[in-house]
Image: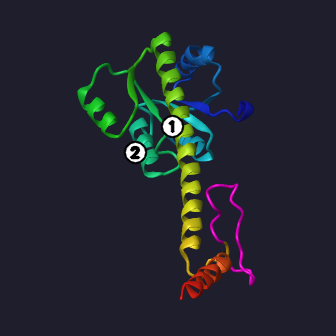
């Protein structure tokens, strides 16, 4: 991978189709990887580093739809967007099955290079936004867990460290035996005895 950047996986059992896809996507400057069968596509996906898949529907042995079904069952691959490519024109049954499986789009061959680049650019940008959001959520979750554990420790009757005063200018008060607030209790006791 160039500089650790995720790749677009191009899957088709015909070399001329792969060449056409590479030519259409080259202006994006995104690293591309080829696979000539469904099995090769699955191997590439499981190796990791794939951001998006352009996948021919009709291939021998393992079809494009089979690849998508497998991707949906594996946590590592189920959130990778897929654009299915078909040479059979508009097929409402194929579209129904494809969208039910969660594909991002269904594109007719021969592909329009400008339209394909636009879709790929959009899906890659959306994936990057989702990844950034996921990282942010995880960091906030870690921070929340840390705050909860601090709160639980502070509420514990055996809490070793007292909570600091919210105003940092107020000095921390400790009694003669090192117990916080001990001198306050003694002053209160003396005041009561003085009143009596």
Q: Is residue 78 left or right of residue 40?
A: left
Task: Give whichever of discs 1 and 2 has the lower sequence position.
Answer: 2
Please tell me which residue lies in front, 23 or 63: 23
Give the residue at x 45% y 15%: 111
Vertical placement of 120 versus 64: above or below?
above
Q: Is residue 123 left or right of residue 176?
A: left
Give the residue at x 58% y 88%: 193
Visible residue check, residue 178: yes
Mark 1–mark 2 Cα distance, whole angstroms, equals 22 Å
Give the residue at x 59% y 14%: 23
Give the residue at x 74% y 84%: 177
Q: Secondary structure at mark 2?
A: helix
Q: Is residue 94 left or right of residue 12?
A: left
Please tell me which residue lies in front, 172 or 160: 172
Which segment did they paint magenta? 162-179
Visible residue check, residue 12: no
Image location of residue 13, percent across then percent down: 51, 29
Q: Which residue is mark 1?
A: 130
Vertical placement of 112 versus 159: above or below?
above
Q: Secondary structure at mark 1?
A: helix
Q: Which residue is mark 2?
A: 69
**Farthest front residue?**
195
Quadrant (top left/top right/bottom left/bottom right) for the N terminus: top right
Q: Residues within 10 Å of mark 2 (few under 14, many from 20)?
A: some
Q: Residues within 10 Å of mark 1 (few under 14, many from 20)?
A: few
Q: Main secondary structure of the magenta part?
A: loop
Residue 188 painted magenta: no
Image location of residue 115, percent across then percent down: 45, 13
Vertical placement of 148 versus 28: above or below?
below
Q: Which corner quadrant of the image does residue 19 belong to?
A: top right
Image location of residue 56, percent across then percent down: 45, 29
């Amino acid at each position: 991978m160039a500089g650790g950047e995720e790749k677009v996986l191009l899957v088709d059992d015909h070399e001329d189709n792969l060449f056409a896809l590479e030519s259409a996507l080259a202006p994006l400057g995104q690293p591309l990887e080829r696979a000539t069968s469904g099995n090769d596509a699955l191997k590439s996906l499981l190796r990791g580093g794939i951001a998006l898949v352009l996948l021919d529907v009709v291939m021998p042995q393992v079809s494009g739809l089979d690849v998508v079904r497998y991707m949906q069952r594996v946590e590592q691959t189920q959130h990778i967007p897929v654009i299915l490519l078909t040479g059979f024109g508009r097929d409402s049954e194929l579209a129904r099955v494809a969208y039910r499986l969660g594909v991002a789009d269904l594109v007719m061959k021969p592909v329009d290079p400008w339209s394909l680049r636009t879709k790929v650019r959009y899906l890659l940008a959306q994936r990057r936004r989702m990844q950034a959001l996921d990282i942010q959520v995880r960091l906030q979750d870690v921070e929340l867990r840390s705050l909860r554990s601090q709160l639980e420790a502070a509420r514990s009757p055996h809490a070793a460290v007292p909570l600091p005063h919210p105003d940092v200018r107020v000095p921390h008060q400790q009694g003669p035996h090192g117990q916080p607030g001990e001198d306050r209790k003694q002053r209160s006791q003396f005041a009561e005895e003085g009143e009596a």
